[in-house]
């Protein structure tokens, strides 16, 4: 891949101010034979930032993306600058999409595959060669993708999405199969794409990867929205170093710790989750005040763990907005 | 719509199978035409080399059979080109990028119909023309003196052969589109005309079923075969199970009707199904 990302976001095309709502998803729903895949999913995607679409495998990300693009039939409505995908006059020039890796005929050359995808919008062959260069596939442009590695397949998929130099990019798990260098390149690429005022929605099941790539996260589990917040908020919300405390005098302890500047949250299991105070200090304060403790343990939730917790058992915690969650 | 057509045109041209299937159709048609010319009018006695069995010169009907050589194998090969129109999209998952590049499904469907129709008509025409060239080059002393190209029934058979190629290609397209599986569509495309219909006709030839024998004339590929029938005369001395009473027009329309129903069904499902 070319290391130079600077020339990629097309010059000379008007871009909307960063932060405007570009993609509006409302009430998406779909089930397969009684099993709910996407459940009343609504969110917005704004320009000028990379939005990560995060969820564990099987959470319904791909189905949601396919619904958004009118590929699957289901309930709800998705608009791109106010219009559904099907009504876009030249879709590839407005929304570039990459859904499934390896979606090409094994013996049709990479270049011809791109020419085919470029044809409906009248995108010239010159641009086909350009995107092949951008994703670093120029040397295999005239080879059939049969022999491509997963990483190369992903890059060919990305090249398809880039053909129309679109204002919006929608990529489903683009980092799958990329080596660390490739991922780093992708991150830089998407960030510069967004920095040029464009809109990027990229899905992943890997929080760590998303945390480095995305400015904003839309997190789903079992087809439902779990969180829709900035990556920073998500991280601080779900992965603070916290101390888990159990006490028969929870109310007194809460007042005491809060009085000393800690943040205390009650957990559903009856324990308290304390942040902003070390374990020893909590023990000392409780001891001085004569409050009995049944448990006192520090817990550092790794991002992945936090994510798993956030997405586990979504039915019981349908939606967690910032501030009323259950950080541990 | 123009964009979708441009894409379909590229799809056909950038697929190796389009070229080798079409090439094979032409080559096999030529080989068959050569065989038909060389054996034109020969009695089985003459073919077996029986002493004294004189060669009989080919008549206009056997000349027309040479022109329609494509109806023997070329039709099936172009049926495969039809199967691949949607078959490959589902086999290789390209239906997703294809539908993101052409989100209006009616446009994609129309483009594929036009592409496959146009391509198969062109290949069919090339095959008929190639057969005519073979007949021209080898005819000299193998056909009776009055045999000619300008014969009205021969011209009809030539047009019928091209139409039959197109209808096979569209049957393939409809089957691949409906079943979304290349193996299933190819099996049906081959088994229906080669095995199922002859078997049904054989069953209908049983004495007890004689009253229904004429139904066998309407089996779609059997009926379609009438497009290349030289004689439209019904010979009542031949049992119904072994002749076809349908005129070329009626036979062609029967197959076209079945293909149209399959296409309509496939399109209806295509509009409603997930990609």
Image: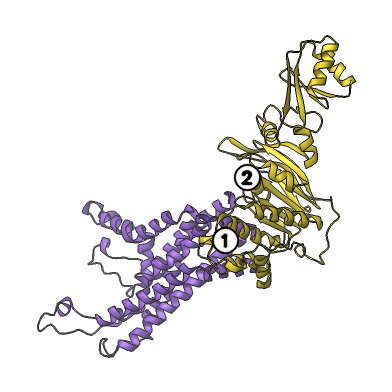
Chain colours: A yellow, B purple
Q: Quadrant of residue A167?
A: bottom right
Badge 1: residue crowd in 10 Å (few <14, some 14–19, many ≥20): many
How many neighbours does mark 2 have within 10 angstroms: few (below 14), some (14-19), or many (20 or more)?
Answer: many
x and y, in percent, of residue A192 in the image: 77, 57
Asked whether the viewer can see residue B105, the reply is no
Which chain hosts label 1?
A: B
Badge number at residue A239: none
Quadrant (top left, top right, bottom left, bottom right) of the C terminus of chain A = top right
The residue singled out by tag 1 in the image is B109
Q: Residue A316 vs residue A49: left or right?
A: left
* In this view, the mark in front (2 or 1): 2
* Residue toward you, B85 or B167: B85
Image quarter of residue B235: bottom left
Secondary element at image label 2:
helix
Callout 2: chain: A
Marks 2 and 1 share the same chain: no
Residue B127 in picture, x, y percent from top left: 41, 77
B208 shown above or below B148: above
- State the residue in front, A226 or B232: A226
Q: CA distance from mark 2 to mark 1?
A: 23 Å
SS for callout 1: helix
In this view, B275 is above or below A40: below
Q: Is residue B60 visible?
A: yes
Q: Residue at x 33, y 85 (%)?
A: B135
Quadrant assignment for the N terminus of chain A: bottom right
* Disc 2 to disc 1: CB gap under 8 Å: no
Residue B143 in the image: x percent, y percent? 27, 86
Q: Which mark is residue A63?
A: 2
Question: Along the horizontal axis of the image, is A291 left or right of B273?
Answer: right
The residue at 54%/68% (across/down) is: B115
Q: Residue at x 65, y 70 (%)?
A: A129
């Amino acid at each position: 891949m070319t290391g130079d990302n600077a020339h990629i976001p097309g010059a000379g095309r008007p871009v909307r101010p960063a932060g405007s709502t570009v993609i509006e998803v409302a009430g998406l729903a779909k089930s397969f034979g009684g099993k709910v895949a996407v459940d009343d999913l609504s969110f917005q995607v704004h320009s000028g930032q990379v939005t990560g679409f995060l969820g564990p495998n099987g959470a319904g990300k791909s189905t949601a993306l396919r619904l958004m693009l009118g590929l699957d039939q289901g309930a709800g409505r998705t608009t791109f600058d106010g219009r559904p995908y099907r009504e876009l006059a030249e879709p590839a020039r407005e929304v570039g999409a990459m859904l499934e890796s390896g979606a090409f005929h094994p013996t049709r050359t990479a270049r011809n595959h791109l020419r085919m995808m470029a044809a409906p919008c009248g995108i010239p062959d010159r641009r086909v060669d350009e995107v092949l260069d951008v994703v670093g596939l120029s040397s295999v442009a005239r080879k059939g993708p049969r022999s491509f590695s997963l990483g190369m397949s992903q890059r060919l998929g990305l090249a398809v999405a880039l053909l129309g130099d679109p204002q919006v990019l929608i990529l489903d798990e683009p980092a799958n199969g990329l080596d660390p260098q490739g991922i780093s390149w992708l991150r830089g690429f998407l960030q510069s794409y967004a920095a040029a005022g464009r809109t990027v929605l990229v899905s992943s099941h890997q929080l760590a990867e998303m945390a480095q790539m995305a400015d904003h996260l839309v997190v789903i589990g079992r087809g439902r929205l779990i969180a829709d917040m900035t990556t920073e908020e998500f991280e601080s919300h779900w992965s603070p170093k916290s101390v888990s405390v159990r006490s028969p005098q929870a109310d007194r302890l809460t007042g005491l710790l809060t009085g000393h500047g800690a943040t205390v949250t009650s957990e559903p299991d009856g324990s308290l989750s304390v942040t902003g105070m070390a374990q020893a200090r909590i023990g000392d304060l409780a001891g001085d005040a004569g409050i009995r403790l049944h448990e006192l343990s520090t817990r550092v939730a790794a991002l992945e763990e936090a994510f798993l917790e956030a997405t586990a058992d979504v039915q019981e915690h349908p939606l967690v907005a910032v501030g009323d969650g259950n950080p541990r | 719509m123009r964009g979708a057509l441009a894409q379909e045109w590229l799809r056909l041209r950038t697929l190796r199978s389009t070229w080798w299937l079409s090439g094979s159709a032409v080559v096999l048609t030529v080989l068959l035409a050569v065989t038909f010319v060389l054996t034109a009018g020969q009695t089985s006695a003459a073919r077996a080399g029986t002493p004294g069995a004189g060669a009989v010169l080919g008549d206009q009907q056997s000349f027309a059979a040479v022109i329609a050589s494509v109806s023997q194998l070329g039709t099936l090969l172009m049926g495969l080109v039809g199967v691949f129109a949607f078959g490959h999209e589902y086999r290789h998952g390209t239906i997703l990028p294809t539908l993101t590049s052409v989100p209006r499904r009616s446009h994609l469907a129309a483009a594929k119909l036009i592409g496959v129709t146009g391509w198969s008509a062109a290949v069919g025409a090339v095959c008929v023309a190639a057969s005519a060239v073979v007949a021209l080059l080898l005819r000299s002393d193998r056909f009776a003196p009055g045999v000619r190209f300008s014969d009205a029934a021969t011209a009809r058979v030539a047009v019928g052969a091209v139409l039959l190629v197109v209808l096979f290609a569209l049957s393939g397209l409809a089957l691949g589109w409906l079943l979304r599986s290349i193996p299933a569509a190819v099996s049906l495309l081959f088994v229906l005309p080669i095995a199922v219909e002859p078997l049904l006709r054989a069953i209908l030839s049983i004495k007890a079923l004689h009253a229904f024998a004429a139904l066998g004339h309407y089996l779609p590929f059997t009926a379609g075969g009438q497009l290349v029938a030289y004689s439209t005369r019904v010979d009542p001395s031949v049992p119904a199970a072994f002749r076809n009473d349908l005129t070329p027009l009626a036979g062609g329309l029967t197959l076209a009707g079945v293909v149209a129903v399959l296409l309509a069904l496939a399109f209806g499902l295509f509009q409603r199904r997930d990609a």
